[in-house]
Amino acid sequence: MKRNIVRYTAGLLMITGLISVSSCKKILDLQPHNSTFTNAYFTNGTDANTAIAGAYALLRSVLLNNYSFHVYGDATTSEFSINSGFDDANYNISNGEFTGLNVGPGIWNWLNYYQLLQQINLIINKVPGIPINKFSNQDDKNQIIGEAYYLRAFTYFYMTRVWGDVPLKLQPDLDVSQAVNIPRTPAADVLKQCLADLKIAESNLVFGYADESQRAVRANKGSAYALEAHITAWTHDYAACEQATAQVINNGQYHLVTDTSQFSKIFIGKSVEGIFEINIDYQQSEGISLNNPYQSGYAPTIAYPFVAQKSNLEWPVSTLYVNTLFKDTTDLRYKKYFFQAQSTSGQTIKYSNITYADGSAKNDPRLSNNIIIFRLADIMLLRAEALNQLGRDGEALTLLNTIRSRAGIANYTGAGNALARTILEERLRELFYEGQSFYDLVRTKQIGNSSSSFISDYSHINDTRVNLGGNLWPIDPTMFKDDFVLKQTPYWQGKL
């Protein structure tokens, strides 16, 4: 029987209703088609724009599912002292128990990613064949093609950081009867494909936005170079990373928000610093309801007085983590990121732009902060890391100290390995709760390094475990049913 990823994604319908959670107002105005993706469907530019809107909507849904974006990237790093009484599953995850009590398959399962990839592959397969006279102009067609290749590269890069080897599927399933299961592809080969896709994306995309309402929430050339920088840093190709980061920084399209009174607006979204974000805007009917802890997008890190009538704080910040990183409490980020950070019930207020759908009654809170994927400060610090690894410490220091200066803390003057550690610590400070920290720690070998002394709690994922893939997430056992080509990651074999 042919099942698993291909069976569930074959012949995917245009998802009715998901268009309402797409990436910009112009796309929100488009109406979905209730038909399968066939040659008859992809006939003009409107169809193509509706399809790419559906892809952004599916990406949003994937990242919000069980708030996995922050579970994978933040809960695993000791940033929070998760309250086991309110969130026992993520309490176990924070202790390195990726298969512990109540850690459900919803966080292990990649089927929804392949639904997203089916949508993207359909766009890549069909849009190039639509005649140019069916679009408003050539740039519109190129933009959609470039975005599709970017989204495929982003999705596969994201998946390899979570699961390592994943099935690489580059064609859509147009006929369910012909769908076949495919084995996991080595992560190195997946990443090579990501970089190949990005070259196509970069050739089709441009810097800037004709419509400023689309800033950051639709991919452009800067988004593609930022992703290329992250992939090449992940593979420790720092020469390529240096070149990609230079493309982002030197183009002049992005700027640090230096007005400290506007700093928190970075995390509302669409700031001049934003490079790629997932749109979550209450004014565009995309706010996230905070009422139900079991629905996607539930925000466990904030409570009263920032959310009226919400007393439970599922993820208080870790005092140990905060005190390790923020030794200088005059740091702008210490003041802007935390509320009562030295309390056992301290909160991160980085994402606390709350609107109440029921007005003064305040019983229906909605979060209206974008998910920040890439922003300029991230790319500047990634460039500093690359320059340090390439022996260009003077240039690395300039970038590092630009970020420190904005935060109001003293310049750093070290070099070599000490500088490398300081750049990492600066990333962990600057990008706290942005879904980056765990990957930064893995990339720089702080997780799985018995000699690392950053925070002792990371010892729960030791070098033996990492060598067997234990820093990766297990694959949901239900996906092995009727799929005999799929194999579990070595560390997790016999543990589920």
Image (tube, grey):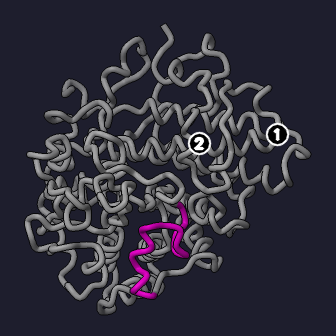
Q: Residue at 67% of width from left, 55% of height from top?
A: 26
Look at label 1 and name its amino acid: Asn
- Does the stretch in magenta take in 421? no
Q: Residue at 37% of width from left, 24% of height from top?
A: 487
Q: Disc 2 versus disc 1: distance between alpha carbons?
A: 18 Å
Is 430 on the left-hand or right-hand side of 49? left
- Does the stretch in magenta take in 271? yes
Is 35 on the left-hand or right-hand side of 287? right
Residue 49: give x, y in percent of width and height.
71, 45
Q: Secondary structure at mark 2?
A: helix
Look at label 2 and name its amino acid: Ile
Taking the image as drawn, is residue 160 in sight?
Answer: yes
Q: Secondary structure at mark 1?
A: loop
Range of residues picked out in magenta:
259-276
Q: Choose mark 2 or mark 1, whichever is in front.
A: 2
Task: Choose between 135 and 225: the one closer to the eye.
Answer: 135
Q: Quadrant of the C terminus?
A: top left
Residue 292, by quadrant, is: top left
Residue 366: give x, y in percent of width and height.
37, 55
Q: Residue at 73% of width from left, 67% of height from top?
A: 210
Residue 429, by quadrant, is: bottom left
Residue 226: give x, y in percent of width and height.
55, 63
Which circle's residue, 2 or 1, is located before the other in the chain? 2
Residue bearing mark 1: 44
Task: Choose between 167 and 287: the one closer to the eye.
Answer: 287
Contact between labelled residues 1 and 2, with CB atoms less than 8 Å apart: no
Residue 152: give x, y in percent of width and height.
58, 44
